[in-house]
Image (cartoon, rainbow, N blue to C red):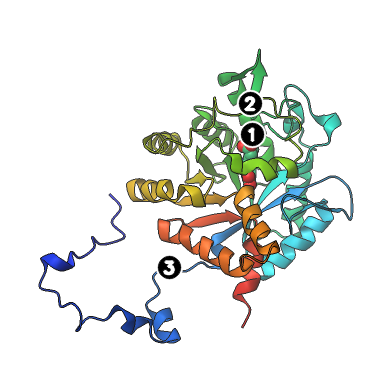
């Protein structure tokens, strides 16, 4: 059992002094003192910046439902990663936008070693060998139906999909990915991917499992960004989790750890802080959260109306993840936050 936080003192049941000897405001009275007793911190290096990649050169396409986020061609991506790395952002999660003509029922472009994501990984590793690259394993950017797995008769096939995910993981590792992040929610994929990587000499390629991924409406802007929203038939409720369930999250994490996940993720983030906390308290493994596109869009929309201070709201939300027990956080605001930290 993880016991990072000691049990709270029951003030009434002890001989502890209370008011007026105790004044909780004493330690809040000065800025330096508040900083000195601060329990949690968010460093730039705790953050992972998710980026959208598109074909072409010198291309930056704004994503309307995610103000401040752009789809970047590989050359532009390199520029942005360089700038982010200078602000001490160390790891990047890459998401490709697949041109419509390359989408198929079986998503076979996912297995093309010359596809956009593999070219992006190779370019980054060549120019910026020290940055960490995390790649998404799932078929949704590549399928005409927008689902994460193979589909037959309206059903998402589990075991048939696993084979494809293993091959997808392998070509991403061969291209140079450091961390494979399966986001598909098929049963058994972590174990099979681990075996495939090990059999092919990629023992040091880590797995960050999207262990607890809910069927959430907060992914809407992401699907706009990767251009899968117009394609998605139905919903993902037969494989992503029901937002009403908490105990089930712990079963998912237990299975993924057993199958060899090095790190686990909860997604979405802020609406699921209770889940993050119980995952961390129960398993004490490296725990990540994804502050997803809809969460980012809410912050940006409120700020655009003058209703919230974007930097302050972003910083406070990132702190909440740390308080709940996160080691790292994927956030579209990662670079904004890192820049904000450097302000005097
Ligand atoms: C797809 C994937 C999704 C996200 C990350 N990987 C969307 C989905 O499951 O439909 C969402 C991320 C976000 O909303 O920012 N496998």
Question: Quick check: marks 1 and 2 in contact, CB under 8 Å?
Answer: yes
Does 304 sit above or below residue 137?
below
The residue furthest right is 57
What's the distance in space between the residues labelled 3 and 2, CA to CA? 39 Å
Report the residue at 49% width, 33% height from top.
Answer: 241
What's the distance in space between the residues labelled 1 and 2, CA to CA? 7 Å
Does 337 sit above or below residue 98?
below
* Whether the residue under disc 1 has CB within 8 Å of ligand 1: yes
Please tell me in which quadrant of the rendered image residue 27 appears. Answer: bottom left
Q: How many marks?
A: 3
* Whether the residue under disc 2 has CB within 8 Å of ligand 1: no
Residue 81 in sight: yes
Image quadrant occupied by the C terminus: bottom right
Question: What residue sits right under mark 3 in the picture?
Answer: 40
Element at badge 3? loop
Quick one: label 1 or label 3, which is nearer the N terminus?
3
Element at badge 2? loop
Question: What residue sits right under mark 2 in the picture?
Answer: 149
Does 297 sit above or below residue 248?
below
Dot 2 crowding, Cα within 10 Å, few <14, some 14–19, many 20+: many
On screen, residue 53 versus residue 164, left or right, reads right
Please tell me in which quadrant of the rendered image residue 161 appears. Answer: top right
> What is the x, y in percent for residue 178?
61, 49
Dot 3 crowding, Cα within 10 Å, few <14, some 14–19, many 20+: few
Q: Nearer the viewer, residue 196 or 330?
A: 330
> What is the x, y in percent for residue 214?
52, 37
Question: What residue sits right under mark 1 in the picture?
Answer: 138
Quick one: label 3 or label 2, which is nearer the N terminus?
3
Residue 137 in sight: no
Report the residue at 72% width, 25% height from top.
Answer: 145
> What is the x, y in percent for residue 220?
66, 41
């Amino acid at each position: 059992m993880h016991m990072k936080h000691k049990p709270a003192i029951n003030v009434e049941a002890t001989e502890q002094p209370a008011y007026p000897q105790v004044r909780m405001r004493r330690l809040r009275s000065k800025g330096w003192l508040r900083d000195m007793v601060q329990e949690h911190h968010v460093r730039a290096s705790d953050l992972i910046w998710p980026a959208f990649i598109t074909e072409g050169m010198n291309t930056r396409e704004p994503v309307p439902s995610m103000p401040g986020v752009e789809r970047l061609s590989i050359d532009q991506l390199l520029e942005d990663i360089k700038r982010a790395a200078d602000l001490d952002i160390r790891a990047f999660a890459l998401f490709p936008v697949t041109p419509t003509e390359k989408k198929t029922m079986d998503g076979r472009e996912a297995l093309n070693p010359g596809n956009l994501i593999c070219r992006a990984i190779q370019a980054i590793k060549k120019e910026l060998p020290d940055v960490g690259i995390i790649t998404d394993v799932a078929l949704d950017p590549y399928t005409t139906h927008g689902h994460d797995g193979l589909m037959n008769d309206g059903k998402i096939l589990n075991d048939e999909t696993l084979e494809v995910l293993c091959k997808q993981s392998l070509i991403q590792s061969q291209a140079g990915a450091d961390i494979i992040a399966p986001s598909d929610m098929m049963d058994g994929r972590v174990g099979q991917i681990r075996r495939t990587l090990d059999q092919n000499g990629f023992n040091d390629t880590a797995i960050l499992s999207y262990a607890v991924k809910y069927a959430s409406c907060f992914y809407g802007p992401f699907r706009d960004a990767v251009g899968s929203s117009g394609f998605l038939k139905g919903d993902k409720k037969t494989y992503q989790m029901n937002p009403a369930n908490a105990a089930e999250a712990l079963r998912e994490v237990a299975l993924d750890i057993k199958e060899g996940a090095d790190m686990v993720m909860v997604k979405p983030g802020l609406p699921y802080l209770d889940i993050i906390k119980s995952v961390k308290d129960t398993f004490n493994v490296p725990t990540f959260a994804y502050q997803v596109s809809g969460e980012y869009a809410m912050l940006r929309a409120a700020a655009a109306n003058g209703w919230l201070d974007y930097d302050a709201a972003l910083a406070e939300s990132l702190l909440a993840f740390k308080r709940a027990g996160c080691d790292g956080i994927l956030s579209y605001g990662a670079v904004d936050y890192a820049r904000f930290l450097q302000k005097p």
